[in-house]
Image: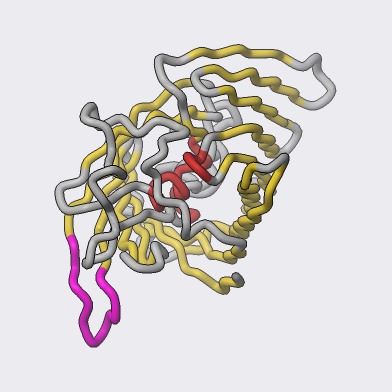
Amino acid sequence: MSSLSPSPEHPGVPRRTLAVYTILTAIMLITLVAASCSTHTTPSRVAPADGVVRAGASYLEVAHIVDNVDNQRVMSRAATGDTSAKERGKVRIEQHVAPVNGVVNVQLIKLGHYAAGDFVDTMSMTRDGLRPITERMQFGSTVKTIHYDGDRLHETIQVGDSVPRALDRSFPMPVFGFNQLELVLQSLPLRPGFHAILPLYSEGDDSLELDTATVVKLAQSSDRSPSASWTVRFADPAIVSTYVIDTLSRRITSYEVQARKSGMHSWIERESTVQ
Protein backbone atom coordinates (compact mmCIF):
# COMPACT_ATOMS: atom_id res chain seq x y z
CA MET A 1 0.00 0.00 0.00
CA SER A 2 1.32 3.44 -0.84
CA SER A 3 2.13 6.11 1.71
CA LEU A 4 -0.75 7.94 0.12
CA SER A 5 -3.22 5.08 0.39
CA PRO A 6 -5.94 4.76 3.04
CA SER A 7 -4.65 3.66 6.43
CA PRO A 8 -6.79 1.36 8.54
CA GLU A 9 -5.99 3.37 11.69
CA HIS A 10 -5.10 6.88 10.50
CA PRO A 11 -6.84 7.67 7.18
CA GLY A 12 -5.10 10.29 5.14
CA VAL A 13 -1.71 10.24 6.88
CA PRO A 14 1.46 8.87 5.17
CA ARG A 15 2.51 5.50 6.61
CA ARG A 16 5.10 2.71 6.36
CA THR A 17 8.28 4.64 5.77
CA LEU A 18 6.67 7.62 7.45
CA ALA A 19 5.71 5.80 10.65
CA VAL A 20 2.10 4.74 11.06
CA TYR A 21 0.61 7.52 9.02
CA THR A 22 -1.11 7.15 5.67
CA ILE A 23 -2.45 9.81 3.40
CA LEU A 24 -5.69 8.77 1.83
CA THR A 25 -4.88 8.89 -1.79
CA ALA A 26 -7.70 6.55 -2.13
CA ILE A 27 -9.64 8.92 0.08
CA MET A 28 -8.87 11.62 -2.34
CA LEU A 29 -11.49 10.16 -4.41
CA ILE A 30 -10.12 7.68 -6.69
CA THR A 31 -11.49 9.26 -9.78
CA LEU A 32 -12.70 6.19 -11.63
CA VAL A 33 -13.88 5.92 -15.09
CA ALA A 34 -16.56 4.49 -17.09
CA ALA A 35 -17.80 4.22 -20.54
CA SER A 36 -21.27 5.70 -20.56
CA CYS A 37 -24.37 3.59 -20.88
CA SER A 38 -24.33 4.34 -24.52
CA THR A 39 -20.78 2.92 -24.39
CA HIS A 40 -17.91 5.07 -25.39
CA THR A 41 -15.44 2.17 -25.41
CA THR A 42 -14.58 0.81 -28.83
CA PRO A 43 -12.95 -2.55 -29.64
CA SER A 44 -9.64 -0.79 -30.37
CA ARG A 45 -9.54 0.76 -26.87
CA VAL A 46 -9.85 -2.15 -24.46
CA ALA A 47 -7.51 -3.60 -21.86
CA PRO A 48 -5.06 -6.31 -22.99
CA ALA A 49 -5.91 -9.99 -22.77
CA ASP A 50 -3.72 -10.54 -19.69
CA GLY A 51 -5.74 -7.90 -17.81
CA VAL A 52 -2.69 -5.89 -16.75
CA VAL A 53 -3.00 -2.15 -17.40
CA ARG A 54 0.49 -0.77 -18.02
CA ALA A 55 1.61 2.85 -17.74
CA GLY A 56 1.57 4.46 -21.18
CA ALA A 57 -1.30 2.30 -22.49
CA SER A 58 -2.92 3.91 -25.54
CA TYR A 59 -6.43 2.68 -24.65
CA LEU A 60 -6.71 4.81 -21.50
CA GLU A 61 -9.51 7.38 -21.87
CA VAL A 62 -8.07 10.77 -20.89
CA ALA A 63 -10.28 13.44 -22.49
CA HIS A 64 -11.88 14.09 -19.09
CA ILE A 65 -8.57 15.22 -17.58
CA VAL A 66 -8.67 19.04 -17.47
CA ASP A 67 -7.66 21.78 -15.04
CA ASN A 68 -9.49 21.15 -11.78
CA VAL A 69 -9.30 21.92 -8.04
CA ASP A 70 -11.08 19.85 -5.38
CA ASN A 71 -11.31 20.67 -1.67
CA GLN A 72 -12.36 17.70 0.46
CA ARG A 73 -12.93 16.59 4.05
CA VAL A 74 -11.59 13.19 5.13
CA MET A 75 -14.15 11.48 7.37
CA SER A 76 -14.06 8.15 9.20
CA ARG A 77 -15.98 5.99 11.65
CA ALA A 78 -14.45 3.26 13.84
CA ALA A 79 -15.91 -0.26 13.72
CA THR A 80 -16.02 -0.55 17.54
CA GLY A 81 -15.99 1.75 20.54
CA ASP A 82 -16.76 5.35 19.62
CA THR A 83 -18.45 4.91 16.25
CA SER A 84 -19.35 8.57 15.72
CA ALA A 85 -18.19 10.16 12.46
CA LYS A 86 -14.99 12.17 12.85
CA GLU A 87 -13.12 14.53 10.56
CA ARG A 88 -9.56 13.26 10.10
CA GLY A 89 -8.26 16.06 7.94
CA LYS A 90 -8.67 18.21 4.86
CA VAL A 91 -7.29 17.59 1.38
CA ARG A 92 -6.83 19.87 -1.61
CA ILE A 93 -6.21 18.29 -5.03
CA GLU A 94 -5.03 20.46 -7.90
CA GLN A 95 -4.89 19.19 -11.46
CA HIS A 96 -3.13 21.29 -14.12
CA VAL A 97 -2.87 20.38 -17.81
CA ALA A 98 -0.34 22.05 -20.11
CA PRO A 99 1.98 21.22 -23.06
CA VAL A 100 5.64 20.57 -22.24
CA ASN A 101 8.02 20.25 -25.19
CA GLY A 102 5.11 19.47 -27.47
CA VAL A 103 3.59 16.82 -25.17
CA VAL A 104 0.47 17.43 -23.08
CA ASN A 105 1.39 16.82 -19.45
CA VAL A 106 -0.59 16.71 -16.22
CA GLN A 107 0.68 18.08 -12.93
CA LEU A 108 -1.14 16.59 -9.95
CA ILE A 109 -0.70 18.33 -6.58
CA LYS A 110 -2.13 16.89 -3.37
CA LEU A 111 -2.00 18.82 -0.12
CA GLY A 112 -3.22 17.26 3.11
CA HIS A 113 -3.60 18.83 6.54
CA TYR A 114 -3.93 16.41 9.46
CA ALA A 115 -3.30 16.41 13.19
CA ALA A 116 -0.08 14.48 12.53
CA GLY A 117 1.17 17.17 10.15
CA ASP A 118 0.94 18.51 6.63
CA PHE A 119 1.57 16.47 3.52
CA VAL A 120 2.43 17.56 -0.03
CA ASP A 121 2.81 15.39 -3.13
CA THR A 122 3.52 16.80 -6.59
CA MET A 123 3.53 14.47 -9.58
CA SER A 124 4.03 15.05 -13.30
CA MET A 125 2.84 12.65 -16.00
CA THR A 126 1.92 12.58 -19.67
CA ARG A 127 -1.83 12.87 -20.24
CA ASP A 128 -1.83 10.22 -22.98
CA GLY A 129 -1.21 6.93 -21.25
CA LEU A 130 -0.69 8.59 -17.84
CA ARG A 131 3.00 7.72 -17.97
CA PRO A 132 4.60 9.05 -14.74
CA ILE A 133 7.64 11.32 -15.12
CA THR A 134 8.61 12.80 -11.75
CA GLU A 135 7.26 12.91 -8.21
CA ARG A 136 8.17 14.79 -5.05
CA MET A 137 6.55 13.76 -1.78
CA GLN A 138 7.08 15.48 1.58
CA PHE A 139 5.78 14.73 5.05
CA GLY A 140 7.50 16.35 7.99
CA SER A 141 11.25 16.17 7.50
CA THR A 142 11.12 13.32 4.98
CA VAL A 143 11.33 14.13 1.27
CA LYS A 144 11.22 11.58 -1.56
CA THR A 145 12.03 12.47 -5.16
CA ILE A 146 11.28 9.88 -7.84
CA HIS A 147 12.19 9.87 -11.55
CA TYR A 148 10.16 7.32 -13.51
CA ASP A 149 11.29 5.72 -16.76
CA GLY A 150 8.81 3.06 -17.87
CA ASP A 151 9.75 -0.15 -16.07
CA ARG A 152 12.54 1.56 -14.09
CA LEU A 153 12.86 4.39 -11.61
CA HIS A 154 15.44 6.29 -9.61
CA GLU A 155 14.50 7.53 -6.15
CA THR A 156 16.25 9.80 -3.66
CA ILE A 157 15.21 9.78 0.00
CA GLN A 158 16.18 12.64 2.32
CA VAL A 159 15.35 12.65 6.03
CA GLY A 160 16.16 15.96 7.70
CA ASP A 161 19.78 16.90 7.18
CA SER A 162 20.95 13.31 6.81
CA VAL A 163 22.88 12.10 3.77
CA PRO A 164 20.43 11.40 0.91
CA ARG A 165 19.87 7.73 0.09
CA ALA A 166 19.51 6.64 -3.54
CA LEU A 167 17.41 3.74 -4.75
CA ASP A 168 17.14 2.22 -8.24
CA ARG A 169 14.33 -0.18 -9.05
CA SER A 170 13.31 -2.14 -12.14
CA PHE A 171 10.05 -4.00 -12.79
CA PRO A 172 8.68 -6.54 -15.28
CA MET A 173 6.36 -3.88 -16.78
CA PRO A 174 5.90 -0.09 -16.95
CA VAL A 175 4.35 1.05 -13.65
CA PHE A 176 2.16 3.86 -12.38
CA GLY A 177 2.86 5.69 -9.16
CA PHE A 178 0.33 4.81 -6.47
CA ASN A 179 -0.52 8.48 -6.13
CA GLN A 180 -1.85 8.45 -9.70
CA LEU A 181 -4.46 5.91 -8.68
CA GLU A 182 -7.52 8.10 -8.97
CA LEU A 183 -6.60 9.26 -12.49
CA VAL A 184 -5.76 5.73 -13.61
CA LEU A 185 -9.08 4.38 -12.36
CA GLN A 186 -10.89 7.31 -13.89
CA SER A 187 -9.34 6.56 -17.27
CA LEU A 188 -9.86 2.82 -17.52
CA PRO A 189 -12.08 1.53 -20.37
CA LEU A 190 -14.75 0.39 -17.91
CA ARG A 191 -17.58 -1.82 -19.11
CA PRO A 192 -19.80 -4.55 -17.60
CA GLY A 193 -17.60 -7.35 -16.28
CA PHE A 194 -14.42 -5.25 -16.49
CA HIS A 195 -11.58 -6.47 -14.27
CA ALA A 196 -7.99 -5.26 -14.36
CA ILE A 197 -4.70 -5.60 -12.52
CA LEU A 198 -2.93 -2.30 -11.83
CA PRO A 199 0.87 -2.28 -11.35
CA LEU A 200 1.36 0.50 -8.79
CA TYR A 201 4.66 1.64 -7.32
CA SER A 202 4.13 2.11 -3.59
CA GLU A 203 6.06 5.23 -2.64
CA GLY A 204 5.66 4.35 1.02
CA ASP A 205 7.64 1.09 1.09
CA ASP A 206 9.33 1.29 -2.32
CA SER A 207 7.69 -1.85 -3.67
CA LEU A 208 5.48 -2.95 -6.57
CA GLU A 209 1.82 -3.68 -5.87
CA LEU A 210 -0.50 -5.58 -8.20
CA ASP A 211 -3.92 -4.36 -7.10
CA THR A 212 -7.31 -4.91 -8.72
CA ALA A 213 -10.15 -2.80 -10.11
CA THR A 214 -13.49 -4.45 -10.90
CA VAL A 215 -16.79 -3.16 -12.24
CA VAL A 216 -19.51 -4.65 -10.04
CA LYS A 217 -22.57 -2.70 -11.19
CA LEU A 218 -23.96 -0.35 -13.84
CA ALA A 219 -26.84 1.81 -12.59
CA GLN A 220 -28.99 3.40 -15.27
CA SER A 221 -30.06 7.05 -15.18
CA SER A 222 -33.13 8.00 -13.15
CA ASP A 223 -35.00 11.02 -11.81
CA ARG A 224 -32.55 11.14 -8.90
CA SER A 225 -29.50 10.61 -11.10
CA PRO A 226 -29.68 12.11 -14.62
CA SER A 227 -26.82 9.96 -15.94
CA ALA A 228 -25.75 6.36 -15.51
CA SER A 229 -22.97 5.35 -13.14
CA TRP A 230 -20.52 2.54 -12.59
CA THR A 231 -19.85 1.00 -9.20
CA VAL A 232 -16.19 -0.01 -9.07
CA ARG A 233 -14.40 -2.05 -6.45
CA PHE A 234 -10.69 -1.39 -5.81
CA ALA A 235 -8.81 -3.81 -3.59
CA ASP A 236 -5.32 -4.19 -2.18
CA PRO A 237 -4.04 -6.14 0.87
CA ALA A 238 -5.06 -3.39 3.33
CA ILE A 239 -8.36 -2.00 2.05
CA VAL A 240 -11.45 -2.55 -0.07
CA SER A 241 -12.84 0.62 -1.66
CA THR A 242 -16.10 1.24 -3.49
CA TYR A 243 -16.56 4.11 -5.94
CA VAL A 244 -19.59 5.31 -7.84
CA ILE A 245 -18.56 7.02 -11.09
CA ASP A 246 -20.69 9.08 -13.45
CA THR A 247 -20.37 7.47 -16.88
CA LEU A 248 -20.50 10.76 -18.81
CA SER A 249 -18.31 13.11 -16.77
CA ARG A 250 -16.24 10.34 -15.14
CA ARG A 251 -16.65 12.22 -11.91
CA ILE A 252 -16.69 10.20 -8.70
CA THR A 253 -19.98 10.85 -6.99
CA SER A 254 -19.41 8.57 -4.02
CA TYR A 255 -16.38 6.97 -2.37
CA GLU A 256 -16.11 4.65 0.62
CA VAL A 257 -13.23 2.56 1.94
CA GLN A 258 -13.18 -0.27 4.47
CA ALA A 259 -9.99 -1.26 6.29
CA ARG A 260 -9.62 -5.04 6.23
CA LYS A 261 -7.95 -5.35 9.64
CA SER A 262 -9.69 -2.76 11.83
CA GLY A 263 -12.96 -2.47 9.96
CA MET A 264 -12.70 1.33 10.00
CA HIS A 265 -15.01 2.97 7.46
CA SER A 266 -13.80 6.15 5.72
CA TRP A 267 -15.22 8.46 3.09
CA ILE A 268 -14.80 11.86 1.45
CA GLU A 269 -17.05 14.87 1.63
CA ARG A 270 -16.40 17.36 -1.15
CA GLU A 271 -16.41 20.99 0.00
CA SER A 272 -15.86 22.68 -3.37
CA THR A 273 -14.76 22.04 -6.94
CA VAL A 274 -13.36 24.54 -9.45
CA GLN A 275 -12.74 23.80 -13.14
128 left or right of 156 in image: left
Q: Which quarter of the picture shows residue 139? A: top right
Q: Which quarter of the picture shows residue 225? A: bottom left
Q: Is 17 rendered above or below residue 216?
A: above
Q: Position of residue 170 (x, y in %)?
A: 51, 13
- Residue 115 visible in rendering: no
Q: Position of residue 220 (x, y in %)?
A: 18, 72
Dominant SS in magenta: loop
12 left or right of 45 in image: right
Nearer-the-camera pick, 60 or 81 = 60
Q: Residue at x 49, y 29 (%)?
A: 202
Q: What stretch of residues is rendered in magenta?
A: 218-228
Nearer-the-camera pick, 147 or 62 = 62
Q: Residue at x 30, y 33 (%)?
A: 197
Nearer-the-camera pick, 103 or 180 = 103
257 left or right of 158 in image: left
- Residue 189 visible in rendering: yes
